[in-house]
């Protein structure tokens, strides 16, 4: 009798332990499921913000491309004039007004926040992770070429033009002299070549592909 009671007690105790363990495992599973659900909601919010930023980044980048291509065409016209004949101040101003100086300003705050706050682990797509991690370096590489161009304009080209030409047009002799000078022609060629460096970066560096791929990989699925 005692043995039977002991056996029943052990079975009951083991059953209780099993039930408790099952309860704990279920609770953990529910907790994990809830946490995963919260993580996916957070991930979607992050992806939506990144997608929004990079849609605007693409708009800005396309604008930079168009403006720089038009500026390069105007510079090509200026540098070809000395070979055709005398460059007048009127013709120079006509072409120079078509040349716009623009730099690419990208929205990177969401990506920076994700990287700096260790939220990257919430993003499940490993390919997207790689694009986000490398975005900052890609952007820096591209803007370096822009900075070379801007530095040349501010430190060499603009001071030369300010000191050697009369933009009110009163001193015709002075303007004709500078427009026909070797220094002027060399500055225009340097100006064109620096801008060509930006155009080359647009064509050859991975920045545009990064923008397009990040947009694709963050596309809302709903």
Image (cartoon, grey):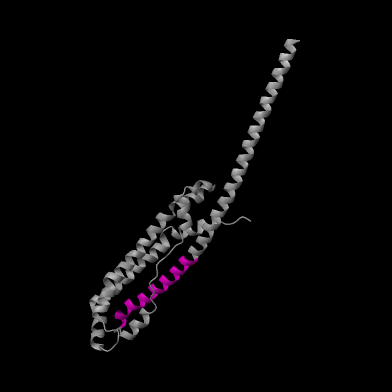
* Residue 25 drawn at (x, y percent): 63, 33
**Image quarter for residue 167?**
bottom left
* Residue 2 drawn at (x, y percent): 73, 10
The prevailing secondary structure element of the residues shown in magenta is helix
**Image quarter for residue 79?**
bottom left
Q: Residue at x 34, y 82 (%)?
A: 93
* Residue 106 drawn at (x, y percent): 44, 62
- Outermost residue on the right side: it is 1
Residue 120 against residue 150 in the figure, above or below: above
**Image quarter for residue 85?**
bottom left
Q: Which residues are magenta?
A: 59-84
Q: Is residue 12 left or right of residue 57?
A: right
Residue 170 against residue 100 in the figure, above or below: below
Whether residue 68 is in magenta: the answer is yes
* Residue 6 drawn at (x, y percent): 71, 14
Q: Is residue 52 visible?
A: yes
Residue 6 vs residue 110, the one in the foreground: 6
Residue 87 against residue 127 in the figure, above or below: below
Quarter of the image where the N terminus is located: top right
Q: Residue at x 33, y 71 (%)?
A: 192
Q: Is residue 72 left or right of residue 111?
A: left
Q: Is residue 131 visible?
A: no
How many numbered discs, if any?
Answer: 0
Whether residue 67 is in magenta: the answer is yes
Q: Residue at x 38, y 62 (%)?
A: 143
Q: Is residue 80 left or right of residue 43?
A: left
Residue 93 vs residue 116, the one in the foreground: 116
Residue 8 vs residue 154, the one in the foreground: 8
Q: Residue at x 63, y 37 (%)?
A: 29
Quarter of the image where the C terminus is located: bottom right
């Amino acid at each position: 009798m005692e043995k039977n009671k002991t056996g029943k007690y052990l079975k009951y105790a083991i059953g209780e332990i099993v039930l408790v363990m099952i309860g704990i495992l279920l609770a953990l599973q529910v907790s994990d499921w809830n946490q995963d659900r919260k993580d996916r909601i957070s991930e979607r919010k992050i992806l939506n913000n990144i997608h929004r930023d990079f849609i605007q980044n693409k708009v800005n980048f396309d604008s930079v491309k168009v403006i720089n291509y038009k500026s390069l065409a105007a510079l090509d016209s200026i540098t070809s004039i000395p070979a055709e004949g005398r460059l007048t101040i009127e013709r120079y101003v006509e072409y120079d007004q078509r040349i716009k100086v623009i730099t690419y300003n990208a929205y990177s705050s969401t990506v920076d926040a994700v990287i700096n706050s260790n939220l990257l682990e919430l993003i499940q797509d490993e390919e997207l992770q790689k694009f986000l991690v490398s975005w900052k370096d890609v952007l820096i590489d591209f803007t370096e070429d822009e900075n070379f161009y801007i530095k040349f304009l501010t430190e060499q080209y603009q001071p030369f033009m300010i000191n050697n030409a009369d933009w009110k047009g009163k001193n015709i002799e002075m303007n004709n002299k500078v427009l026909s000078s070797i220094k002027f022609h060399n500055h225009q060629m340097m100006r064109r070549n620096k801008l060509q460096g930006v155009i080359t970066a647009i064509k050859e560096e991975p920045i545009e592909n990064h923008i397009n791929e990040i947009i694709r990989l963050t596309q809302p699925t709903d």
